[in-house]
Image (cartoon, rainbow, N blue to C red):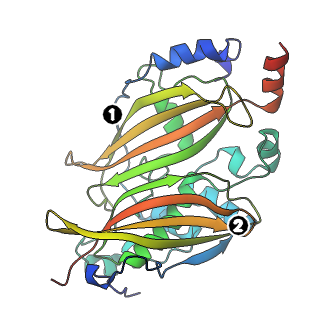
Amino acid sequence: MSQTKKRTPEEILEEARAMIGNESRPRTDPYPVEYEPIRRYCIMVDDDNPLFLDPEYASNTKYGSVILPPFASFGIMSGGSPQQMADYLTDPETPVMPPHPGEFVINMAQEWEWFKPVKVGDHLTMKGRLADVYMKPIRLDPKTFWFTVEMIFSNQHGEVVCVVRNIALSHRSPEEVAADQSG
Amino acid sequence: MKRTQLYWEDVQVDQEIPTSYSMKLDATRMTLQVSGTQDYYPVHHDRDFARASGVPDVFVNTGFLGAALGRLLTDWIGPEGWLRTFRVEMRKMNLFGETMTLKGKVTRKYVQDGDHYVDADVWCETEAQGVTTPCKATVLLPSRG
């Protein structure tokens, strides 16, 4: 977002709020959901649940195969890295990530709703929507931007498997804040 | 590898979730965080970057917290249980060097449209900061009835 640094936060906010309601183009993952990212994801927190790791065990459950752990979304469901996700959300043709003056972004809350299991081999499609953006101070920056982006994930049958609302903030560095206040 | 199944009738309001566990956020765990989530944003692994941004140190990302909280819940509800909704608030950072403990408590159980639901408060806490990450979960469980 460095291209927006010369404008005031208020000017950037005006542009950002005009984007509320923007929807991204649907992005279908070129790869199916795979075993290996799930294995890495589970190892991260010592999760040894065989529903996520053992094809033989999972084949005897009601799901019939290994399923994705519930929160394994952006890095795994999207089939790419969070940077690829960020690039997708800022696609110039259908941006849903609003411009913001600070370079530091922190997730503050997430709301999840799950409807269907995601199985190894599924092909997922995601779609984003900018739900809200506003300015509200935090200790580090009196002109912090807060934004809510909704992500809807569906499978190859067109069924919505989960919906995530991510509430994040973006703040400036202490140096940028000091410069703004002195200028 | 066989897992015990939890049934709705076995759950009591105010009971603690029995799958509580702790995890040290040491250098290996912070590295696993990047591998497991594929989140390369440097505030979660680059101490210089994190401090320059004004925070005390690197801290685990949202994907890691989801995985850790998901383990607590899916270990509890068993293979026939289903996590239906969840809200997590990142109120404080779970910082490098801390030991994070994951806990939960049942707040409500009810039947709606023939389905058997349980609501629970779950959270992460550290010794130095107390509750860092409060959450609310709703799960669907099988019924013996």
Secondary structure, mark 2, is loop
**Residue B25 got which mark?**
2
Q: Nearer the viewer, residue B69 or A81?
A: B69
Using residue B72 as the reference point, say whether residue A21 is left or right of it: left
Using a 10 Å C-alpha cutoff, classify the residue at mark 2 as few (fewer than 14 neighbours), some (14 to 19) or many (20 or more).
some
Give how far across and how far down residue B69 sits, in percent. 50, 65
Using residue B10 as the reference point, say whether residue B107 is left or right of it: right
Res. A183 image quadrant: top right
Q: Amino acid at mark 2?
A: Leu
**Residue A26 got which mark?**
1
Residue found at x 26% / y 78%: A61
Q: Chain of mark 1?
A: A
Secondary structure, mark 1, is loop
Quarter of the figure that contains the N terminus of chain A: top right
Q: Is disc 1 on the same chain as disc 2?
A: no
- Mark 2 and mark 1 residues within 8 Å of each other at the beta carbon: no
Q: Chain of mark 2?
A: B
